[in-house]
Amino acid sequence: MICRQRTGIPVETGAVVQDAVKTAGKNVYGKTTSAKKFEWTCPLAENDAVYGLGENTRGINKRGFRYTSWCSDETNHNESTQSLYGAHNFIIVRGKKTFGIFFDTPSRITFDLGWTDIHSITVSSETDGIDVYYITPEKQTKESSLCNIVRQFRTLIGTSYIPPLWGFGYQQSRWGYRTEKDVLEVRKQFRKAGVPLDGICLDIDYMEDYESFTIDKKKFPDMKKLSSDLKSDGIRLIPIIDAGIKIKDGYKVYEDGKKNGYFCKKTDGTEYCAGVWPGRSNFPDFTRKDVRAWFGAQYKNLTDAGIEGFWNDMNEPAMFYSDESLAAAFKKLESFSGKNLDINCFFDFCGTSGSTFNRLDDYKRFYNEVTLKNGRIAKRRHDTIHNIYGSHMTRAANEGLSAILPGKRTLLYSRASCIGSHRWGGIWTGDNKSWWSHILMELKMLPSLNMCGFMYSGADTGGYADDSSEDLLLRWTALGVFTPLLRNHSAWNTKRQEFYQFEHPQYFKSMMQLRYSLIPYMYSEYVQDALSGGMFIRPLAFDYPDDSRACHIEDQLMVCGGLMIAPVYEQNADGRMVYLPEKMTMVRWHAGKAEQTLLAKGDHYIEVPVSDIVFFVKHSALIPLCRPALSTDRLDTKHLTFLGNGIKYDLYEDDGFTTDIKTEGRIRRVRKEAE
Ligand code: MIG
């Protein structure tokens, strides 16, 4: 059961699709106060756990720390970080009473989950209107109450984005593929080594002067021909689109936006201007329907060249500086001139030029036009609706692409997000580092993302910033094989990290062969989970709620209906301890082949050389594998082999593109005997 409690007149965030919810009566948990500031508090008992918050740091059980939903450009994130690129305000409290709670607000909101006091939660926000949804688990369900709460929540927020089938293929990216030649080199290396590949991402260098929706003809003389050549080889191009629009006469997108008043404005009615890639830029007011329609239509410049996939970047929005913060920084720097820079001012001096980056006072300088939940249109200062800006850029792209390419799914993922945009696109988890701790961080983030509806997700595999090494990339890839979005991406000033830069390309080939063999199964599970509100990736606690050992495990995950993974995330490890909550089949994937061993419930030390992927199949499950191919459009699902001891599997299949997604008539029962 879901109940809603409304305070004030909230802004429409787009998160919720179902309005048939009861107004909160007695099915309310904790206490709400809303004198000036909204606050919700709830006591926690000794063994209670808190799950959720999607893209954020630290544990799967989030108890014991504080978090802030505030879409932030945060490459250097670590355990101290409280906000990342997405804002996902859903938590589940597991205790004597287990319930879910969703805070539907576009404003900054803080979650003190047993940080100040380990025995209580305090959630607070300075919003002037908020909808709080309380979710009580249904009685008598086959699944755990945790899964049931997520399922109800996902019904409330609507079906998660389903990418085209090729979005499950491998994507190679690098901020550094500058020209057509660079792209062709990537294809050559993959195809030469016989390693599967479905996508190559184009970062900002393909644009003219970093202007969104343009193509630099000097570097990419014939994008249409390039994309069609690559497509015939099963590879698609995925260009980046930036939120900030360069202020430049003669740049059509800017001129249109300016003429029609589509950019965010300050109180004096002039456009708000901040520096991003192209220098001084304006920011489309994505919370306006007409602006979304206009922006969405711009994608046609690239779809006309045969492009069918995009990634939307810098849409928190990230800002290097504003006119105001830049002027203040210069003034301050000047004031240091001729001074004796002692301890009292040297560090202040050092920090001054960096102080212009993503400032709260800058987010207070401009306005967005939003729709309120009573249907009225209103102006809101950006900082009060910050968390839905990026998600509405995804919405603009999704709606635009659906209109441009009707009946066809396109690939779309974004950096910033808010619950609601899980329906419009996927997300990658933003800039990370080539750190072992970031493998573990991704592992812990994935189930939380699934709770919040973000199923099509994954990290920059191998790490974005800093130099990667072969062992790190291999271990990270061994996790990535199980995430719907699997992309190797890195920054321009780091060591190249395509598999062919390293000593053992055959290890990557083997791992990609596993991925491609699993794609029909993963796709089938993904679509069925998206349609039914199931979680593609789950903490063990969600499948084995009565096993207290399983409930405390934070470095193993359940994936799809039938798999458990236990990735290695420590350098130089030769294996790891794995806990099996029931009897399972261990699969050792080595040199493109599976070796299966039945293991008893309990603890096992499993050796895992960097060349191998080891994972586990639930005792009752049967996992179909197809023969790997170089791209998803070449996968043959007629001939399947199987992992595990189950007897049958219901495989969902479609053409990989259709927008008419339904299971009727598309499920084929496959059995082991068919081998
Ligand atoms: O501030 O387009 O997260 O993936 O390579 C950097 C350049 C802007 C941030 C993205 C990253 C991308 C980079 N972008």
Image (spheres, rainbow, N blue to C red):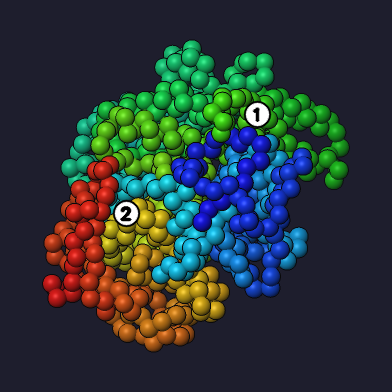
Residue located 33% across and 79% down the image: 619
Q: Which amino acid does label 2 sit on?
A: Val
- What residue does disc 1 label? 381
Residue 527's x, y, as percent? Answer: 32, 54
541 left or right of 635? right
SS class, disc 2: helix
Q: What residue type is labelled 1?
A: Arg
At label 2, counting other C-alpha atoms closer than 10 Å, the crowd grade (few under 14, some 14-19, many 20 or more) is many
Looking at marks 2 and 1 on the same chain, the residue that comes earlier in the sequence is marked by 1
Residue 563's x, y, as percent? Answer: 36, 70
Indicate which disc residue 527 carries: 2
Residue located 48% across and 63% down the image: 138
SS class, disc 1: strand
Does the image show residue 586?
no
In this picture, is 338 found above or below 254?
A: below
Residue located 78% across and 30% down the image: 332
Residue 161's x, y, as percent? Answer: 38, 46
User: In terms of depth relative to the viewer, which is nearer, 138 or 513?
Assistant: 138
